[in-house]
Image (tube, helix red, strand yellow):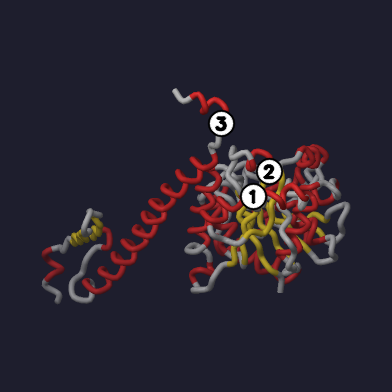
Amino acid sequence: MGKVIVVTSGKGGVGKTTSTAALGAALARTGQNVAVVDFDVGLRNLDLIMGAERRVVFDLINVVQGVAKLPQALIRDKRIETLYLLPASQTRDKDALTEDGVARVIAELRQRFDWVICDSPAGIERGATLAMRYADEAVIVANPEVSSVRDSDRIIGLLDSKTTKAERGERMAKHLLITRFDPARAARGEMLGIEDVLEILSIPLIGIIPESEEVLRASNIGAPITVCGRDSAPARAYNDAARRIAGETLDMIVPGEKKGFFNRLFGRRAA
Amino acid sequence: MNPFRLFRPVRSAPVARERLQILLEYERRMVSQSALITTLREEIFAVVSRHVTIDPERINVSIDRGEGFSTLAVDIEIPNKAAARA
């Protein structure tokens, strides 16, 4: 039985889709079977970020409505053979997703894959609540910026009340993924620091992705950052985050922090 | 004007942090309060409807938060005919 993870944030544009693709590819490269599922009905983009936009035939709603079988809708990644994409519908509206239908599709995905990673739409409406509904764990993507942190707090509240896990009285494991972090600005006090965000949201940190030109480059060419920018700082940070999701314990690398003499001397706070 | 201000770097992050802490403390309280009201409404409905037939839409539960204490107001409309059932 696979594990279902929702990648969510409340606010749009913080990096949910980029993170879903990057984490999915990183997990799949270890040989495990991974499905990434786009829940953003009407505004799908995971297909584009994965470079599979021209291979979409059937989508999540077709499967939910029984028009297509799950294997017909799954698109196998061209680079990593254990990575699959279930795209969202671009034409239907989000009301076509039903709670029962989504439950069935998630149950089937859980049987076939080791990891099912659900890319949530922004907001707190139906699409977002359905994406998180059947998850075992959540990755909350946040930028070190006030509106993103506020929305993350709302999403944490929903994860603790509107998911089947919460309704059964179980605890939903939540991991914070901070993206677009600019260490230089944080050091100058121009951007919320990692510890500020952690203190406010008080959920465990799974990774810090530095702001990087590589992320745009990856989306331009349609490959997850962990595939095309292997040695870049964001790719390494996503790879580490994926390993932590899989249960490994790794030291957290804070971008921009060098363990040099100067920093030790002045004991700079672990940003 | 303090001339030293000109040389001090602009540290806006502490302002962001403080604003967020104040705001989220308030918002979390509001969310938990609305959850409390929902629970109270459901349970009050269950108790009252054991004795009289009432419309779940006609129950109004509200909490008025004050300085020293808060007030819980419960307003239930009972149709005259139904009241006889008890």
Vertical arrangement, residue A3 with respect to residue A212, above or below: below
Label 2 with label 1: CB-CB less than 8 Å = yes
Q: Looking at the picture, tell me which residue is in the foreground, A270 or A247.
A: A270
What's the amino acid at mark 2?
A: Pro
Q: Looking at the picture, tell me which residue is in the foreground, A161 or A210.
A: A210
Find disc 1 in the rendering and name its residue.
A271
Query: Quadrant of the image for the N terminus of chain A?
Result: bottom right
Q: Residue A101: x percent and y percent?
A: 60, 62
B13 sits to left or right of A251: left
Q: Chain of mark 1?
A: A
Q: In this rendering, do the residues under marks 3 and 2 share a single chain? A: no
What's the amino acid at mark 3?
A: Arg
The Cα atoms of the two marked residues, 1 and 3, are separated by 20 Å
Residue A183 bears which disc, if any? Answer: 2
Q: Chain of mark 3?
A: B
Q: Nearer the viewer, mark 1 or mark 3?
A: 3
The residue lying at 69 percent from left, 48 percent from top is A17
B39 sits to left or right of A28: left
Q: Nearer the viewer, mark 3 or mark 2?
A: 3
Residue A178 bears which disc, if any? Answer: none
Find disc 3 in the rendering and name its residue.
B8
The residue lying at 61 percent from left, 62 percent from top is A204
The residue lying at 21 percent from left, 72 percent from top is B48
Crowd rating for badge 1 (residues with CA inside 10 Å; few <14, some 14–19, many 20+): some
Vertical arrangement, residue B1 with respect to residue A226, above or below: above
